[in-house]
Amino acid sequence: MTPGALPPAAVSWAAWLRTWLLEPVADAPGGDIGRAVEVEPTPQPRVRVAVVGLGPACGATTVARGLAAALATRDPGGAAIVSSAAQAAGATLPPLRGASRLAARLPGAMAVGRLCVWHGSDPAGTVVSAGPLAPIVFDVPHDGPASDSASLADATVLVAPGDAEPALVDLAARTLARHGREPFTVVNRPAEPGRWRERAAVLLPDSRLAARLTFAGWQAPGRLGQVLARLAEDCEAAS
């Protein structure tokens, strides 16, 4: 037998093995069997949430970023996207590595804490470009159209100021429900929590320091962080 050649039994075994491969493995020069090419799995879309503010300075942007930060801690990539049509001020705290990597893949995006803040007015284009990369939270301004973002989202969060009229908030929630599922109602720092019993899913506590950290793209500490973490779970369960 020629030195280096396989015996007849080994040749038959190799031929039988190749019949079970999905794709034939090419022979490398010299008769050695080449290595199979690894195929990366197709990325799966992540949860998408629309956060809609009911008035100026109602805290919708803070809720959007805090919710996105909570979703980021639950995502394998460790980051989330906040898509906003408004140019919100950035933060001075350094971003985490996951957010920096994500921002590098989205032209014009800014890494903030755990978040990748991406300004744009095309929710559908955002979903196409970034849907498989990370969770997306649409930060919808109070004077902007909410129907496009709500129709693309797995869950919608309605943010009302603490002095809002509950009946009007209920009307806004029913209007948004026409474009998707029933929204989660969040009331920011209500002066009279009892007025919102059985009407609001979340009552946000008054915590200025936690709100500042949240706006900077970090998961909120304390009571605010616990509330937003539960809201993130509810939004994921709705997807």
Image (cartoon, rainbow, N blue to C red):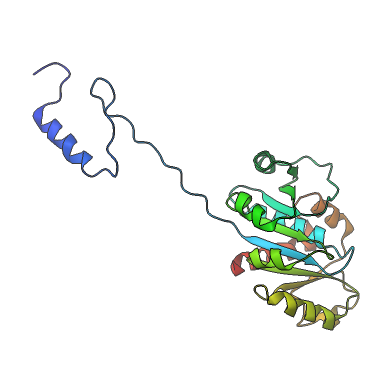
User: Outermost residue, top direction?
Assistant: 3
Image location of residue 48, percent across then percent down: 64, 60
Q: Is residue 67 visible?
A: no
Quadrant where the image shows the N terminus: top left
Q: Is residue 216 above or below residue 238?
A: above
Q: Residue at x 85, y 82 (%)?
A: 195
Q: Residue at x 70, y 68 (%)?
A: 156
**Count of marks, rendered view:** 0
Q: Quadrant of residue 153?
A: bottom right
Q: Residue at x 68, y 62 (%)?
A: 49
Image location of residue 163, percent across then percent down: 91, 75
Q: Quadrant of residue 187?
A: bottom right
Q: Is residue 178 above or below residue 107?
A: below
Q: Is residue 232 visible?
A: yes
Q: Residue at x 69, y 67 (%)?
A: 150
Q: As drawn, is 100 to the left or to the right of 203?
A: left
Q: Is residue 62 above or below residue 94?
A: below
Image location of residue 210, percent across then percent down: 83, 56
- Tell which of 125 and 38 is nearer to you: 125
Quadrant where the image shows the C terminus: bottom right
Q: As drawn, is 34 to the left or to the right of 68?
A: left
